[in-house]
Image: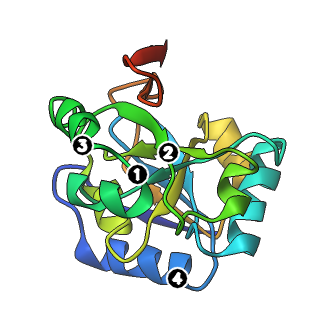
Amino acid sequence: MKILKTNQNKVDKKVIDEAVKVLADGGVILYPTDTVYGLGANIFNRKAVKRVYNIKKRSYLKPISLLVSSKDAIPLVSRASVNQLNFMDKYLPGPYTFILKKSKIVPRHLTSESANVGIRVPESEIACNLAKLFPITTTSANISSEILEQLGCEVDLVIDVGPLKSKNPSTIIDLTAEEPIFVKR
């Protein structure tokens, strides 16, 4: 495991470039978002996504959300309507995960049998830059120094910006029904 330190407010481009290379090569990284640290993998790499599931000890039947670099990328990974996009515009970028109908490019190994996918566009320069070439997984790592040591052998790279301001995961808003449903705050 390699640890790269950077500042959340002044991001080192070399750190981003190295992390993106790890992701492109099928690696798993630990990275900061605007809420908590997340486990990231290229969503199109089945083995990398499987590693995320294994690190989290998560059932393969439980979908993992994805992170995209900007609001403009949401239509690529979802079948969001104009109304849904307008609704999300008020909240993004920010600490929200929106549940939407997934597009055909979203791999089944990410969402199991679900027709839906959770999508994030965080207010984090680091996280958004990591997802510029391809969407990445975004699932909380529930990081403390002890957990970082436990995960150390399982992740390939850590982007360390120190403690994050937030300790709460993103708020989940389901947009697949007629009215938005706040699932988790």
Q: Residues within 10 Å of mark 1 (few under 14, many from 20)?
A: some
Most foreground residue, 50 or 13: 50
Most foreground residue, 36 or 49: 49
Pointer 3 or 1: first along the chain: 1
Circle on res. 79? 1
Pointer 3 or 4: first along the chain: 4
Q: Are marks 1 and 2 in contact (CB under 8 Å)?
A: yes
Amino acid residing under circle 1 = Arg
Q: CA distance from mark 3 to mark 1?
A: 23 Å
Q: Nearer the viewer, mark 4 or mark 1?
A: 1
Amino acid residing under circle 4 = Ala
Q: List x then y, in percent, for residue 93.
A: 22, 41
Find disc 3 in the rendering and name its residue.
123
Q: Nearer the viewer, mark 3 or mark 1?
A: 1
Quadrant containing the C terminus is top left
Circle on res. 24? 4
As helix, strand or loop, the secondary structure at mark 1 comes to loop
As helix, strand or loop, the secondary structure at mark 4 comes to helix
Q: Place residue 141 in its image quadrant.
A: top right
User: Is residue 65 visible from the viewing direction of this image?
Assistant: yes
In the image, residue 147 sits, relative to residue 43, either above or below, namely above
